[in-house]
Image: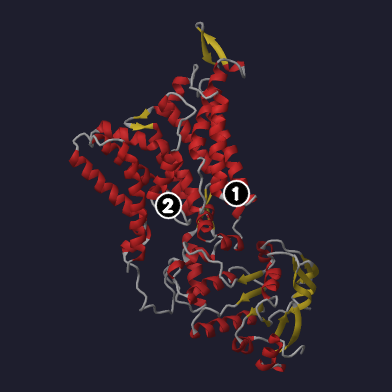
Amino acid sequence: MAEPGRVPGLDLDNVGRASWWQRGLFASQSAYVSLALVAVVIGMSLASQNFLTAGNISNVAQNFSFIAIATLGITLVIITGGIDLSVGSVMCFAAIISAMTMTALSDGSIAPWLITTVDGKPAAAVPGLIVALSILAGLAVSLVIGLANGFAIARLGLSPFVTTLGMLSIVRGLCYVVTNGRGSFPSGPDADLFYAITAGRVGPLPMSFVYLVGLAIVMAIVLHHTAWGRHVFALGGNEKAAELTGVPVGRVKIQVYVLSALAAGLNGIIVSGWLGSAPANMANSYELNIIAAAVIGGANLAGGIGGPLGAIVGCILLEVIRNGLVLAQVSSYWQQTLVGCIIVLAVLVDRLRTRGP
Amino acid sequence: MALLELSGISKSFGPIKALSDVDFAVGRGEIVGLMGDNGAGKSTMVKLIAGNFPPSAGRIVLDGEAVQFHRPVEAREKGIEVVYQDLAICNNLSAAANVFLGRELKRRVGPFRFLDHRAMTRRAAELFADLKSETRPGDLVHKMSGGQRQAVAIARTRLAAAKIVLMDEPTAAISIRQVSEVLDLIRRLRDQGIAVILISHRMPDVFSVCDRVVVLRRGRKVADKPIAHSTPEEVTALITGAKETA
């Protein structure tokens, strides 16, 4: 029995094995950006003694989760060679719909049997049901938006950029329409539960961070150990080849746009819990930060490359730099400029590395 | 009885008649060379048989059964494997992943089905060894030579029990040593009773492995004869139109 990877009876003495640092995870942009992150963290902690305090770390963990779950979703789309510009609007719309559903369920304007009265105050008839229904409503609208994106791109053959740019505007408009421009906020007898599961903590860890880690682990397993994950990569590598070899190209495409919208929706609902409201301008232009984080973390906009680790590292790096600039009392106006520099730098380093000997 | 029989096949793309009333047949264990200049209709022929689109007119009979393909997967399920000219390979995936693309081996863990990496790597290594190719299953295709990429595309056709293997210019991009290996492989396929349709511009390849040669010119079949009764000069004349029919 030949060992896997060896071709029996064949001498490959002129073809060496690539060095460990040129293979697998180590050869990826994600690894380089992780190193950069460690360097930045060390630099920051030397520059400011407030940086590595428990409070600040928890703060950073909370803040980067603001966009991290949506970044996981968009990373899937980017791996297939697509783009989803509608994520910021979807975050907001999902949060608004979920807050409005909660309000409507709580004041009895729909399904009044969900509300009973305890000691003269309204209370939930079934504890947690209102929260569950509200969150499901938010995710349901995300699902519909994702399906619309996916259908237009995979079945009608529209360009992902234009389709999702249109969806960005359509959904943001709907946010203003349904709230008359004011936004909404979670209220009612289940509101405390809603805040606990979105903005609460598990021990020292923010809930959003816990969700993020769970989803990232699932995503890593699905991407690298299922046929579906392999098809996602194949789409980004050579869509024509995927089609010819029998990969259900259209279906996989629709699925990644649906997952991207669902991730954005969930992220938006969590953010609204943390903010305590879902204003109609929430997550405005977040799509740029989300795409930036994915790209910094190593997702290739040309398709075929990316993963959850890179997505998270990209989000952390953005947040650590933002946080560091605040601690260092640098004007917040500089943040955006610096983020732009980092995007270009990360892609440049990757380019130089892959071109090198 | 022929394994695959196309009769009265025409295919138009708008005003262009890519194929007009072509008959074509291939039997079990037969190697047929399909030749013609650019625009003669070779690619259209390949795509019809491979299931990329159905013909505008005419019928295709495979193994005694009339078939109508709309997608390549349907043709593959009936035992028609194709090595495409551009190889249909994903550069960002490993050789083994490319070989198994679209029909990955899976193993069941509870309710989930995960990729069986080890089995795929092992099977791919065996296939590459059969092809005498210096290709490591775990390497990314993106770093590979033309011959190795060719081996990946050919290894794919060996996954299932194919009845017919279509090869579109399989020797166009590879080294001289590898050409003779690919030709050996084609003979080995024939010895197993598989029908091979070889589309090639290279006269020596066609004359060294094929049993029969079919020449297309401007969408029509101008020759269909045993290779032993023809010469490279005659075929060249047929392709260019210097000789009208054989």
Q: CA distance from mark 2 to mark 1?
A: 20 Å
Which amino acid, by three-letter code, is at mark 1? Ile
Which amino acid, by three-letter code, is at mark 2? Ala
Chain name for mark 1: A
Residue A178 shown left or right of residue B53 in the figure: left
Q: How many marks?
A: 2
Residue A308 shown left or right of residue A85 in the figure: left
Compare marks 2 and 1 and give the one earlier in the sequence.
Answer: 1
Disc 1 marks which residue?
A: A153
As drawn, A294 above or below B222 = above
Residue A355: % across, % down: 36, 65
Q: Residue at x 78, y 76 (%)?
A: B22
Disc 2 marks which residue?
A: A299
For the residue pair A87 and B68, the one nearer the viewer reads as A87
Residue A357: % across, % down: 32, 69
Tag shown at residue A231: none
Q: Residue at x 49, y 48 (%)?
A: A76
Q: Is residue B127 visible?
A: no
Q: Secondary structure at mark 1?
A: helix
Residue A151: % across, % down: 62, 46
Residue A252: % across, % down: 57, 51
